[in-house]
Amino acid sequence: MATAEKIDTHHKALNLNLDPTIFGSFAEIGAGQEVARWFLVVGGASGTVAKTISAYDKEVSDHLYGSGSRYVSRQRLEAMLENEWGQLLEQLERARGSQTRFFSFVDTVSARNYAGTNEPHGWIGLRFQPEPGGAPNDILLHVNLRDPSNVLQQEAIGILGVNLIYAAFYQLATMESFFANLSQNVVRERIEIDFVDFGGPAFASWDRRALLAYLVHAGLAEAVHFSSTSVPTPPSEVLYKRAVVLAPGYFGHVDPGHGQIHVQLLTAGVRELRQELGESSAAPIGIFSLSAAPRGSEDATPEIPDLLRRIEALLAQGVHVLLFRERELYAMTALVNRYTNAPVRFVVGLSLLVRALQDPYSHLEGRRLEALSRLFAQNVRIYAHPMTSADLQEAIKDLSPTGLEWSETNGWVSAKQLRVAAPLGHLYEYLLASNFLVPIHTSVTG
């Protein structure tokens, strides 16, 4: 019953129940059995539900799905999918495989605990056949639960699960239609999807990196992670308990020469934090960060091909990249601090620092002071890397900043050599004196 019209969760579940070709199993751990419950209460469940199981006990879960992996992880999710799909086909394929599109839905979720001390998140997976006897297709999601209570988080997982099954069978024509149905009534305010992976012929035309960028571009995620050296992961897995150096920027130049400059900047920031922490601490991780938001209030929102062009140029340098929904540094820090209590540092060239100071932050009630308080209240410092005077002049020519001067050493300008007119200059001097803003010194700047 494919339709472009948006229908509610009740009718999605009912439509699936009334489709005689769709039949499958449910295995849910950690947030009740809210997905299966929808199919059981709307009527006609015997037409869809072959089995529903919830292996909450760890020994039971290990017996079914194997031990050795974290209980809320991709590894556990994939083990659940393999087990449930194998059982489904073994028990039912001979009897009804010729007229049935089978599916197995699984999830493993850490919903809000009683004390509210955990970071609620989960892994959700679906294996399905678009036609009877067809090759199976997989789609895997990592989600962050944003509701304030366990009950509401369970409810949100239930809606998302129904959306996923419905979208897989009825809305696969385009990536956009699939995610519009998947996110209906639950994503953005209640659930964030910060990772997706897929496999099988149904997704042959889908590009993994484009899909990750789409999650941010469409507002379904605050940030997504790209890696050139390993399979993509949710941001939480690369940031977890790590000291982090973020190198933010627009990265409009994608040639190798600029790529080398970007790497030198990030390397300098990681080296600075390494010295700050001492050799006994774990090595910090360096990450390039860019935004899917417009560069300025008058600019258009970047399109996905443009974002990917810049991301792939950074990945070619063999580094991690985070694509954020927002462009403000305090928004980037807020996300990173979900997953680590270790120090977070930004390393920036002077031109980006000037841009940040010039921004009036008119969308905030407290304007520039509120932006700075949000940023520096979160265990953050900014490492300011020097630039040549000529490069700085070129980089900020579109700003025409008033009251900005600098001196130079051997043609280079450091953060201490910038002079900002009062009253903003007083704030700038305070940031330097308080070590919130740390100039990086090189051999050419003294």
Image (spheres, helix red, strand yellow):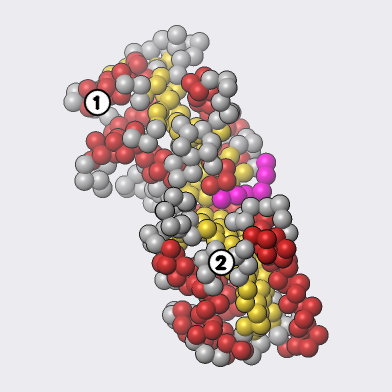
**Which amino acid, by three-letter code, is at mark 2?**
Met
Give the magenta part as a residue range. 229-234
419 on left or right of 192: left
Give the CA separation, mark 1 to mark 2.
Answer: 47 Å
Pointer 1: residues within 10 angstroms few (<14), some, or many (20+)? some
Q: Main secondary structure of the magenta part?
A: loop
Q: Considering the image in quadrants, where does the N terminus appear?
A: bottom right
**Residue at (27% x, 20% y) in the render:** 429
Q: How busy is the neighbourhood of tag 2: few (under 14 within 10 Å), some, or many (20 plus)? A: some
Disc 1 residue type (three-letter)? Leu
Relative to 435, residue 69 above or below: below
Residue located farthest toward the left when viewing the structure as drawn: 423
Residue 245 vs residue 40, the one in the foreground: 40
User: To which residue does mark 2 refer?
Assistant: 175
Name the disc covering residue 170, or none: none
**Residue 198 appears in the rendering:** no
- The quarter of the rendered structure image containing the C terminus is top left
Mark 1 or mark 2, whichever is nearer to me? 1
Q: Nearer the viewer, residue 213 or 403?
A: 213
Residue appearing at x 64%, y 36% in the figure: 318
Where 311 falls versus 60 (above or below)?
Answer: above
Residue at left 51%, top 33%?
A: 243
Instruction: Please tell me which residue lies in front, 391 or 376.
Output: 376
Q: Position of residue 99 (x, y in %)?
A: 73, 88
Please report whichever mark, 1 or 2, sits nearer to the chain's N-terminal start: 2
Q: Residue 180's x, y, as percent?
A: 48, 69
Q: Residue at x 56, y 25 (%)?
A: 281
Labelled disc at residue 427: 1
Q: Is residue 19 magenta?
A: no
Asked if labels 2 and 1 touch by Cβ distance under 8 angstroms, the answer is no
- Residue 238 lies in quadrant: top right
